[in-house]
Amino acid sequence: MPAKDIYHDVVKRALVKDGWVITHDPLRLRWGARDLYVDLGAEQLLAAEQEGKKIAIEIKSFVGPSSVADLEQALGQYVLYYTLLHRIEPQRVLYVAIRESIFNSLFEEPIGEVLLEDKRVQLLVFDPKEEIIIKWVT
């Protein structure tokens, strides 16, 4: 089992505050003889439609010496998890959870903007102090 990200519990509490039910902590993706683990799986029941919305969250702290290197690693995990999740649970949507300060410094400049424009990654942006979700970027 992988180690939890330093913001794991913060994101978990933010999701619960936002009305999500944590269903997996972590969400195991078994493919062949390998097990991979997405940090969280959650569901939100939509009473009006009587259907559930399911998500998977990979939490990234971006505390390494290079935010670009952290981005490269996060995108590699995202692509791998997205590919497997699409085959195992196609109804579950994958997000990368990042702090608002990382979103502002990385995704509001050209390198991050192009990723969002091309819809390469979906983000959950959170405030670690308030333990709330700031926005969902799809």
Image (cartoon, rainbow, N blue to C red):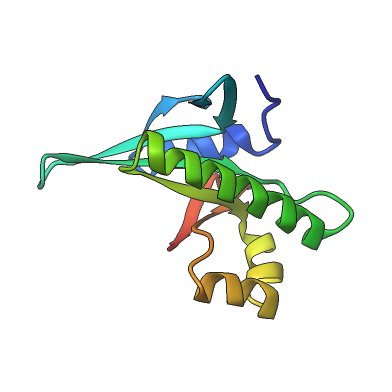
Farthest residue, direction right:
65
Q: Position of residue 43 (x, y in %)?
A: 32, 36
16 or 38, which lies in front? 38
Residue 99 position by quadrant: bottom right
Q: Residue at x 39, y 33 (%)?
A: 88
Q: Position of residue 19 (x, y in %)?
A: 33, 40
Q: Residue at x 53, y 64 (%)?
A: 120
77 or 55, which lies in front? 77
Q: How many marks?
A: 0
Q: Indicate whether 43 appears above or below 133.
A: above
Residue 51 position by quadrant: top left
Q: Quadrant of the C terminus?
A: bottom left
Q: Indicate whether 107 appears above or below 121.
A: below
Name the side, left or right, on which 6 lies relative to 66: left
Q: Indicate whether 138 appears above or below 63.
A: below
Residue 47 position by quadrant: top left
Q: Position of residue 75 (x, y in %)?
A: 64, 54
Q: Residue at x 63, y 45 (%)?
A: 77
Q: Position of residue 58 (x, y in %)?
A: 57, 42
Name the side, left or right, on which 59 lies relative to 44: right
Q: Quadrant of the N terminus?
A: top right
Farthest residue, direction front:
32
